[in-house]
Amino acid sequence: GLEGKVEARTRALDAESAERRRAEEALRESELLFRGVFNSQTDAVVVVTPERTVVNLNPAAEVMFGYSLEELKGRSTEVLHVDHEHYARFGEILRSAFARGEAARFEFELRRKNGEVFPAENAISSLEDGLGRPMGIVSVVRDITERQRAEEERGRFVAILEATTDFVAIADP
């Protein structure tokens, strides 16, 4: 009778509670994994709103740009750009790629807190909810200063070799 119904309902509530605890634990583990990956990246990772307001950045981004998360959170990413025109052009590249349903991958100069402008490789993806509505943007940024310097050195070396009429031999030790 009534006692059996109460007992069955209690078992059902216990099962729901156990399932909810398992789901919460899985979510906690997923968040820990995400935080670990996010914080261990050697490339800068910047998470912004669809309007390009900073939500989060990883430790590598703090080092690369010279700003702490507290300094940038809630601010426009315009502060990371050379000037307003540059910021607007960057936004157009994003809008164009996202309209095609693609991530944006391109080289574009950015600016550190100390004013230094540096060449960067950018990989930028739109974050969308389950219905395809934009929730934010994730930017992965790599400082390519050293790579560009090496390419320039190689270019100068090749130019010297091509310009010389002397015999040149390169040998290992």
Image (cartoon, rainbow, N blue to C red):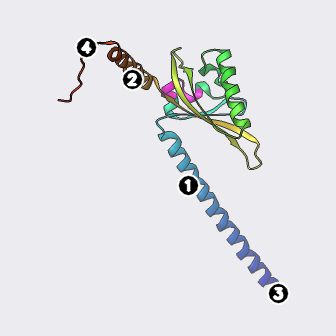
The prevailing secondary structure element of the residues shown in magenta is helix
Q: Position of residue 87 (x, y in %)?
A: 66, 20
Q: Residue furthest left?
A: 173
Residue at x 41% of width, y 20% of height: 149
Asked if 68 appears above or below 130 in the picture, the reply is above
Q: Position of residue 29 (x, y in %)?
A: 55, 54
Q: Dividing the picture into quarters, in which one does residue 100 lie?
A: top right
Residue at x 61% of width, y 55% of height: 27
Judging by the rendered image, the residue that carries numbered circle 3 is: 1
The circle drawn on residue 158 is: none
Q: Dividing the picture into quarters, in which one does residue 9 lie?
A: bottom right
Residue at x 59% of width, y 58% of height: 26
Closer to us: mark 1 or mark 4? 4
Q: Are marks 2 and 3 in contact (CB under 8 Å)?
A: no
Looking at the image, is mark 1 or mark 4 earlier in the sequence? 1
Local SS, label 3: loop
Compared across the picture, whether 100 is left or right of 22 comes to right
The circle drawn on residue 166 is: 4
Judging by the rendered image, the residue that carries numbered circle 2 is: 150
Calculate the distance from the C-alpha at mark 3 to the C-alpha at mark 1: 42 Å
Residues shaded magenta: 62-70
Q: Amino acid at mark 2?
A: Ala
Q: Is 66 or 164 nearer to us in this picture? A: 164
Q: Amino acid at mark 4?
A: Asp
